[in-house]
């Protein structure tokens, strides 16, 4: 029974992470200077525009989250390499602890430290999207929607072409993940006028629930994991 449990890929876990991802994005965009925490494509576009217009101070505000995102991916991979097979805490739980700690700290940062706040959120988002990459065996992203939308439409088209009900379930799962991401953004928008800078702590609570679910995750064998 234990070997069949894979909570890191469970739909409920993906839903919690997507709620958190949507909240993080709306938090940095509405509260921290219109910077995207997760959608680095948007940051690259805005960086390029401001670079051409010689708005160098604004350019830095978009460049730093990009670098932070890249470093977050690197740290997540290192944690996996170093702690996979640990019998005390799953390596994914270690990543979540780091992410929760960073986002909790962001709630204390004043508006004049928005660059640092956005860097920390981008760093934690990267750790999350690198660590949790599958739901029920299908690739997905909990902090952005474009890949999920493409995969969802592809599966839906395959369902209509083949009448394979499994493809419909996969499509429904992708669209549900997008829905939860949107709900997270809506939740963040609702909470911002009330809790302001502390709104990001709602994301910490969602990640804490994900952390708890992983106590039911099967342990992976110790190995040199570079794949």
Image (cartoon, rainbow, N blue to C red):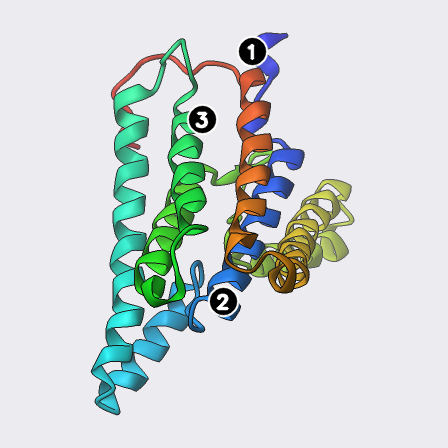
164 or 119: which is nearer to us? Answer: 119
In the picture of the structure, the residue carrying the numbered disc 1 is 3
SS of the residue under disc 3: helix
Foreground disc of the pair 3, 2: 2
Distance from disc 1 to disc 3, alpha carbons, whole Å, reads 18 Å
Distance from disc 1 to disc 2, alpha carbons, whole Å, reads 43 Å
Q: Residue at x 73, y 56 (%)?
A: 161
The x and y percentages for residue 122 are: 37, 54
Q: Residues within 10 Å of mark 2 (few under 14, many from 20)?
A: some
Foreground disc of the pair 1, 3: 3
Distance from disc 3 to disc 2, alpha carbons, whole Å, reads 28 Å
Q: Is residue 82 left or right of residue 206?
A: left
| Lower sequence index among marks 3 and 2 | 2
Determine the image quadrant of residue 114: bottom left
In the picture of the structure, the residue carrying the numbered disc 2 is 31
50 or 198: which is nearer to us? Answer: 198
Q: Is residue 138 left or right of residue 73?
A: right
Q: Residues within 10 Å of mark 3 (few under 14, many from 20)?
A: many
Q: Which mark is residue 93?
A: 3
């Amino acid at each position: 029974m234990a070997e069949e449990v894979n909570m890191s890929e469970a739909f409920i876990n993906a839903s919690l992470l997507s709620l958190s991802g949507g909240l993080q994005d709306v938090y940095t965009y509405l509260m921290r200077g219109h910077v995207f925490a997760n959608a680095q494509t948007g940051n690259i576009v805005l960086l390029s525009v401001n670079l051409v217009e010689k708005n160098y101070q604004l350019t830095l505000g978009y460049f730093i989250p990009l670098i932070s995102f890249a470093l977050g991916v690197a740290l997540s991979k290192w944690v996996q390499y170093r702690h996979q097979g640990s019998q005390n805490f799953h390596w994914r739980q270690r990543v979540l602890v780091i992410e929760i700690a960073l986002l909790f700290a962001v709630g204390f940062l004043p508006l004049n430290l928005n660059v640092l706040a956005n860097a920390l959120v981008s760093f934690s988002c990267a750790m999350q999207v690198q660590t949790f990459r599958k739901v029920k065996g299908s690739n997905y992203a909990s902090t952005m929607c474009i890949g999920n939308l493409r995969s969802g439409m592809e599966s839906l088209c395959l369902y209509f072409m083949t009448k394979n009900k499994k493809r419909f379930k996969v499509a429904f799962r992708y669209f549900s993940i997008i829905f939860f991401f949107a709900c997270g953004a809506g939740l963040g928008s609702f909470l911002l006028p009330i809790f302001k800078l502390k709104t990001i702590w709602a994301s910490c609570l969602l990640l804490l629930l994900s952390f708890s679910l992983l106590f039911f995750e099967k342990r992976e064998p110790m190995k040199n994991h570079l794949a």
